[in-house]
Amino acid sequence: MKKIKGIGLSSGIAIGKVWVWESDFLKVPEYTVARNMVEHEISRFNLAVKETEKEIISLQEELRKNAGNQYADIFSFHLSLLNDDFLKEKARDIIINGRVNAETAVKRVLENVIREFNKSSDDLLKDRRRDLSDVIEKIISNMKKSSSPAARRTRDEIVVARDLAPSQTVSLDKKHIIGFVTEVGSITSHTAILAKALEIPAIVASDKITEILRDGDLIIIDAEAGVIIQNPAPSVIEKYRLRQEKILSRKKELSALKNLSGETRDGKRVCLQSNIELPEEIETSKKYGAEGIGLYRTEYLYLNRKDLPCEEEQFLAYRKVCDRMGGKPIIIRTLDIGGDKFLSDFEYPREMNPFLGWRGIRFCLERTDIFKTQLRAILRAAVSGNLRIMFPMVSTVEEVLMAKEILSEARDSLRKDNIPHCEKIETGIMIEIPSAALISDKLAGEVNFFSIGSNDLVQYTLAVDRGNARISHLYQPCHPSVLKLIKMTIDNGIRAGIWTGICGEMASIPEIACLLVGLGAEELSMAPVAIPSVKEKLRRMEGQELKNLAAEAMLFNNHEEVLGFLQKKIR
Ligand code: PEP
Ligand code: MG
C-alpha cells in the first residue's frame, strides 16, 4: 500500500482499477493490412509526413517572428529528422514486410531507435531521442482519424494520464470512467472545472503518477484530501467505503436546502446560480437548487468536431437550455475560444502565450462571421427564455462598443430576414483582466451587468498560469490585489446602478463566497454541486455581519491571512 499526493478537485472518492491513458500517440491502433492495402498505408504515411512538415515549418516561422532565430532553429533538427531517408525507409520496410498499418510501423521505428539511444549515456543523444519522439508523435497524430480511446471503455476504471485536455475530459465515457488522476493541472484549469461539473472525483498535479501506477492497479482516490492510495489493504478500502457513504448522506442533508432561496439570515437575496458547459448539466443544476445559470460556457458546443456549429444547431441548443430552465435567468457567454480550448479543425495560429493571445472577444471581433452566427442564434433563442449575453476577455471599452455594434447588426439582419428574435436583451461583460477591473467605472456605463471571472482575474493579476502545477501555491484568489480589484469593480457597478456577480471558482468556496457577498456581489455562480454548501453558510449569516467581515478581510497582507481569518469567523 502506498500513498501518493496531488491536488484534489472535489469531495468525491473513487475506488477502482487503473487505466493508464498513455500519451495518445502511443495508443495507436495496431493491425495487419491486406496485401492490396500496403500501398494505401504507404501513401497515408507519406501524406502525414508532408502535413507534419508543414506544421513544423509554420511553428518555426512563428517562433522566428516571436522569439528569434535561436529558438526557431531548434526545429531545423526536427525537420532534418523528418526528411531523413532512414525514417522513411524503415517505416516503408515495416509496412511492406510486416504488412501492418502505418501507425504501427512508425511506432516500431521509434521503439527501435529509442532502444539504440538508451544504450548510450550521452545526454545529447537523450535530447535527440525526445526530438524524435516529438516528430513521430506529430506524424502519428496526423495519421490518426479515430475517436479518443477513452470513449471506448467497457468497465469501470480510473483514468491516469499525464494530462487531459478539456476536450479529452469531455469525451470521457462517464458510464465507465469513475475518476481521473493527472500529473499536471491545477484547480482552475478548464479540465478541473469540467471534472467538477461532471462530478467526477479527480486529482491533478500528482508528480510522476503515470510512472508509479500500472494498468489494473487497484487504487482509491480521495479527491477531498488530494490523496491516491495504491493497492490499499482491505481494511482501508472498508474505511473509504464508509466515507463514500458519509459523503452521500451529507449530500442528502444538503439537498434538503434545495428549494430554499439563496439569502442571508435577515433576508438579503443572493442569487445562487450554476456554471454549465453542456446542456446536460441542467439536470444537475436543478438537482442542486440552482436559481439560474450564471455562466453557460458555449465553447463546448464547438469542441471535438470538425465543423463549426451552424446557426440552427446553436439556436436549438440554446433554446433547449431556455426550455429546461423554465424562465429562470441564463447568462450565455459568447465563444471563449483560445487559451486552452481550441477548435479542432480550425487553422489556429500557434502562439507563444495562448492565454495572452487570440482568445475570447479578441477572436470574435476578428471572426465576425462566427460571432454573428452565434449572436443570431442567441437572439432567436432568447424569445423562449430569460437569456442574457455576456462577452468574455474584455480589456478595453472599444471592445465592448464593437461587440455591441455586431450584436445590433445581428439583430438588424434577423429583422430583415423576418425571423422571430428578442429585440431587447441584457448585455454584460466578464471582468477577468485587471485592466477591465481598473476601468470598470468606464465600462459600467456600457453594460447591464458585470460578472467577475476570478479564474482568469487571479491568473492575470498575479501572473500565475492557472494550469501550472509547479506554481499553484502562488495562485491565490484571496491575494489583497485580487480582492482590491473585485471590490473596485463591485463599487463601480453600484455607483453606475448595475449589479455584479462572480462566476469564477472562488465563488464555490463557502467562506470566500461569504466574503464576496460582504463586498456587495449580488449573484454567485459556481459548479452546481457547490451550491448547497454555499447556501448553507450564507443562510446562517446576517447581511451586516458579512459586510463587517469583508471590511476586516481587506486589511490583511496576504492570501493565507485572509483565508485563515475567514475560516475562523465562519465555522
Ligand atoms: C473565469 O475566468 O473565472 C471564468 C469563469 O471563465 P473560464 O474559467 O471559462 O475562463
Ligand atoms: Mg475566464
Image (spheres, rainbow, N blue to C red):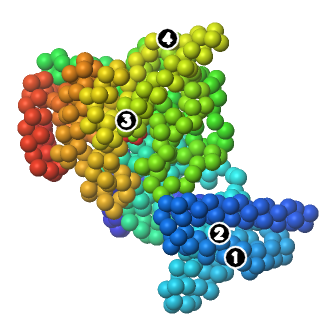
Q: Spatial distance from mark 3 to mark 2, Cα to Cα?
A: 43 Å
Residue that carries the numbered disc 1 in the rendered image: 109
Reading the chain from its start, which is encountered first: label 1 or label 4? 1
> Foreground residue, 486 or 197?
486
Is ligand 1 within 8 Å of the beta carbon of the residue shown at mark 1?
Answer: no
> Foreground residue, 294 or 29?
294
- Disc 3 residue type (three-letter): Thr
- Disc 2 residue type (three-letter): Ile
The percent position of residue 402, horizontal first and vertical second, equals 46, 28
Reading the chain from its start, which is encountered first: label 3 or label 1? 1
Marks 3 and 1 in Cβ contact (< 8 Å): no
- Give the secondary structure at mark 4: loop
Q: Quadrant of residue 190?
A: top left
Q: Residue at x 31, y 22 (%)?
A: 445
The percent position of residue 362, horizontal first and vertical second, equals 48, 39
Q: Which mark is drawn over residue 423?
A: 4
